[in-house]
Image (cartoon, rainbow, N blue to C red):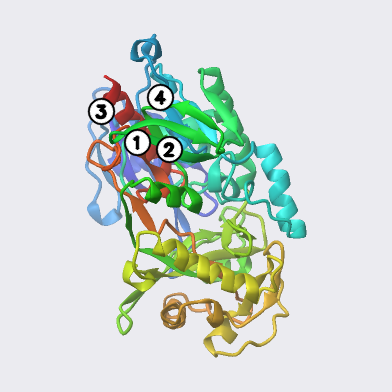
Amino acid sequence: MKLQISGLVLELGEGEERLPGKAAGALGVPREAIGDLQVVRRSVDARRSRPPRFVYQVTLRLAAGVSFVAPDTRSGVTAGVAGDESKGFAASPAADRLATSGERPVVVGGGPAGLFAALVLARQGLPPLLLERGKPIPQRLSDVLAFWERGVFNPESHVHFGEGGAGTFSDGKLTSRVKNPHTAWVKEVLVEMGAPAEILVEARPHVGTDRLRAVVIRLRQRLEALGCEVRFGAPVSDMIVRRGKMAGLVVDGREEIQASKVVLAIGQSADDTYKKLAERGIALAPKPFAVGLRVEHPQAAIDGIQYGSWAGHPQLPAADYFLTAQIAALGRSVYSFCMCPGGRVIGCSAQPGGLITNGMSRHRRDSPHANSAVVVNVRPEDFGEGVLAGLAFRRHWEEKAFAAGGGDYRAPAQRLTDFLAAREGGLAVETSFRPGVRSAALERVLPGFVTQALKAGFREFERKMPGFITREAVLIGVETRTSAPLRILRREDGQSVSVMGLFPCGEGAGYAGGIVSAPQDGIRAAERVIRALD
């Protein structure tokens, strides 16, 4: 009999070889009755009232003829017969499908959504043409390093544009709050491409930017081996629409490509593409997003808050946090976003003359810094009329931050304590931000309601996590790319409500964000293309 057990606990110092014995004790069976135990999920329980410990969900085989006793519910352990869960997309190539359909789909965008859409299409016998406006990772990395080290910005090759999309320069977090049958398959593909195998079981898995780059290159090579054509430096500058249907694409203002089925996975920073969509009458709608700052603490401080006297134990990972606050007086929510333990804050400008921050970490999360975005919800009525108003709103504050940082892509920064006290103060604190920071009053680079909500939110964070407010904490501005400020409207079948054959997906379409949810949406888009061709 195959069972699934949740809630098995290992204390600090205990190894996973003790799990079979723990399982046997919970079930009231002999240790030798336990076989083929596999870890399904592992998480850290770091409540401050007791030593940190590790909590496991496992599957196992119970020897034939052995009966078990349901664990006492007070123990926190549960057991039941394991089901055969779907592993997500079941790929089975369909021979000659491309020849039968008589057309080749086109995928626009080489980020997570576009790459997985292309993979699904290719494995179903429809290898697409994939158009990416940026560069392959090796050349792109050179451009990004030039930006971080010397402030040299390339508008077509940066943290947002290029192979792998914005996720290439990130923590590589693989968390998603949406249950989706494709989640397991996405992770399995990443492991197949070289991601660490522990992402299959960790409760908060991450790859790390250093490992993720190699994973993305191998994924692109797999696509090419399956017959996909991948073209870099190929910005889609226009769309050809005839009688409400996709007919083709214009690349870089010169080349026309016939295309009646297009997966549009542009990411959220292609403002020029959004404007072209609006010009072509493709239905868009404003949507809420969030704006705020990055807060950076010494990682040791966060470890001390979360782990107490057990901080520094070799078994414990760099501590993280997720905090929220509802500011009733302002009708706003404040929350941490994209927390990067053992990481660094990076500049990720998307256009000349604008300053944007983000967080990044390597697989080992071994930086002495911890950072997180802390943001406030922004509603469409906050940024004015028109479907593109959100783009102008965020651009305005990015330009303010650029100017406050000195106009050379250094970021404006301020101690958290000085921000709360409304004084500029001095910044004799080391930060991880590249290409550098300048002391500034950050309330000048934020909407007034965001500043007010952040100040109230930080005080609530201190109540929930004593020690969060400290002179060692530095705020760096601004964070504006939590999600797209608009949505490309689509029908139930995944096609644009305005243009048949156009399948918007991923973060840029306003329906997903992150290295798991964006591929999930890309997979759905590919499946809908296939159905449209059948």
Residue mark closest to the camera, 2 vs 1: 2
Residue mark closest to the camera, 4 vs 3: 4
Residue at the location (55% across, 90% down)? 421
The alpha-carbon separation of the residues under discs 4 and 1 comes to: 15 Å
Disc on the earlier residue, 4 or 3 = 3
Disc 1 target residue: 502
Q: Within 10 Å of the Cα at label 4, are there few (<14), some (14-19), or many (20+) other Cα atoms?
A: many
The alpha-carbon separation of the residues under discs 2 and 4 comes to: 22 Å
Under mark 1, the amino acid is Leu
Task: Give coordinates of residue 1: x percent, y percent.
Answer: 26, 26
Under mark 4, the amino acid is Leu
The alpha-carbon separation of the residues under discs 4 and 3 comes to: 46 Å
Of residues 235 and 309, the one drawn nearer to the viewer in this rendering: 235
Under mark 2, the amino acid is Met
Hey, which quadrant is residue 136 in on the image? top right
| Residues marked 2 and 1 touching at CB (< 8 Å) | yes
Residue sitting farthest toward the right: 150
Residue 121 numbered tag:
4
Residue 239 numbered tag:
2
Under mark 3, the amino acid is Val
The alpha-carbon separation of the residues under discs 2 and 1 comes to: 10 Å
